[in-house]
Amino acid sequence: MGDHPKNSRKMWRKPKRPLNYDLLNEELYVLGTYGLKNKRELWKAHTELSRIRNQARSLLALTQDVRSRKEPTLMKSLTRIGLVKEDSTLDDVLNLKVTDLLGRRLQTVIQKKANIKSPYLARQAVVHGHVMIGERVVNIPSYTVTVEEENQINLSPGVEIGKTKQQPVIEETKPEEQIEK
């Protein structure tokens, strides 16, 4: 499984101690805060963060001249998606938390930008195709928003999330008034 191009690999790793009480509480808090569908989405974010931090650690182990050639590539990609600032160091990359990565998801960005009440409403808006980046509709809640795309995000025209639709009021006339006219 995974060796053939048509068979994709698993993109996440489970925690080593899944029944740790403190870990379970922390996971549930993060799931609710960011409106994740299930713990697998959280585990994917942990695995991605682990991959990024592993790259930073391997760069720290290299000699200075090799490191000076390879470090800008990692820093540029992390700056592009908004995880670190331009003048950041590898220590800042090692200090990243999973909440930093989850904060760059389309679901979270649209919740903050469009003032949507809950992350679950934001997820629903994305899945139903009500969110646009520029001129294209994006319906993937886990889409990582780059810094350039952040100011192009908006709701589709005519969509109001979290507001009740008011139906037109029809004035009822009494049958007696209709006869008199």
Image (cartoon, rainbow, N blue to C red):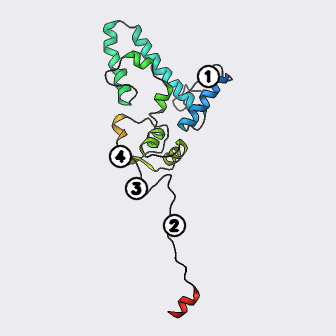
Task: Kindly check if marks 1 and 3 are in contact, taking CB atoms under 8 A apart as contact.
Answer: no
Q: Quadrant of residue 72?
A: top left
**CA separation in Å, label 4 and label 3:** 12 Å
Residue 162 spot, x, y in % from top left: 50, 52
Query: Neighbour class for label 1 at 10 Å: few (<14), some, many (≥20)?
Result: few
Residue type marked 1 = Pro
**CA separation in Å, label 1 and label 3:** 42 Å
Screen quadrant of the N terminus: top right
Task: Kindly check if marks 1 and 4 are in contact, taking CB atoms under 8 A apart as contact.
Answer: no
Q: Is 77 left or right of 123, judged from the image as shown? A: left
Task: Kindly check if marks 2 and 3 are in contact, taking CB atoms under 8 A apart as contact.
Answer: no
Query: Neighbour class for label 3 at 10 Å: few (<14), some, many (≥20)?
Result: few
First reached walking from the N terminus: tag 1 or tag 3: 1
First reached walking from the N terminus: tag 4 or tag 3: 4
Q: Is residue 67 above or below residue 7?
A: above
Q: Circle 3 sits in a helix, a strand or a loop, which is it? A: loop
Report which residue position mark 4 lands on. 134
Q: Residue furthest top?
A: 63
Does residue 9 show up? no
Residue type marked 2 = Gln
Residue type marked 4 = Gly
**CA separation in Å, label 1 and label 4:** 38 Å
Specify the label residue 157 is tagged with. 3
**Looking at the image, is mark 4 or mark 3 nearer the viewer?**
3
Does residue 22 show up? yes
Which residue is at a point 54% across and 36% down the rendered structure image? 33
First reached walking from the N terminus: tag 2 or tag 4: 4
Q: Is residue 74 above or below residue 38?
A: above
**CA separation in Å, label 2 and label 1:** 50 Å
Report which residue position mark 2 lands on. 167
* Of the pair 84 and 127, the residue shown nearer to us: 84
